[in-house]
Amino acid sequence: MGTGRIEAFSDGVIAVIITIMVLDLKAPSDASWTTLLQTGPGLAIYLLSFVVVGIFWMNHHHALHAARAPEPPLMWSNLAVLFALSLIPFVTAYVASAHGSPLPVACYAVTLALSSLSFTLLNGVIAAQHPAGDIVRVQYRRFIWKGTVVVGCYLLAVPLAYVNVAIAYTIFVVIPILYVLPDRATVDER
């Protein structure tokens, strides 16, 4: 049996996560530019969260195709990823409603760190399913290294949110950009 059932379930959960996020967006109370511009920060954090969840979804798709079997460690680590991602709508709404306060930004950073950590663990389970020297195992070991660095960056954003929320937001924006850019090592091996 393949991982198709796990992927289908995960796709459904991720679709619900994105739906919940958009339902938290509030329409402006009147039809003025001033009121519309006041929704900007909420729209910006929604866009960022949408991109982050989308990146996780795409990487998750590729990860499950690299998995060899739907063994319990794979299923449990996948549930950990889905749990962490399911917290993103809550912290997105919290950040949008708090207008740049440090605590919501720190909570957002912790949630992104938890999501990245759980996905890094999923990558570790997938790497362990392949024999030493296998190209998939080598590639996933690189993904684990990258994920570990990302977790560290998100955790660094927690105290930085109390110093200057703009620095934390910069970390939140730069990391997805790094995931959108092609990984040179992966491109070279194709």
Image: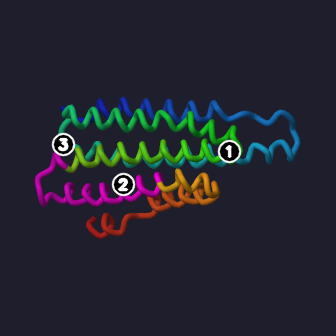
- Which residue corresponds to the image point at 61% horizontal and 35% vertical from the top-left? 22
Task: Confirm whether the magenta stretch covers residue 134.
Answer: yes
Residue at which label 2 appears:
147
Near-viewer residue (108 or 82): 108
Which mark's residue is nearer the viewer, 2 or 3? 2
Quadrant housing the C terminus = bottom left
- What amino acid does circle 2 point to? Gly
- Magenta region, mostly helix, strand or loop? helix
Residue 46, percent from left and from top: 61, 43
In the image, which disc is placed on residue 43? 1
Figure quadrant of residue 90? top right
Task: Confirm whether the magenta stretch covers residue 99.
Answer: no
- Which residue corresponds to the image point at 47% horizontal and 53% vertical from the top-left? 154
Residue at which label 3 appears:
68
Quadrant housing the N terminus = top left
Distance, label 2 to label 1, CA atoms, is 27 Å
Near-viewer residue (136 or 151): 151
Distance, label 1 to label 3, CA atoms, is 39 Å
Looking at the rendering, the stretch of residues picked out in magenta corresponds to 128-155
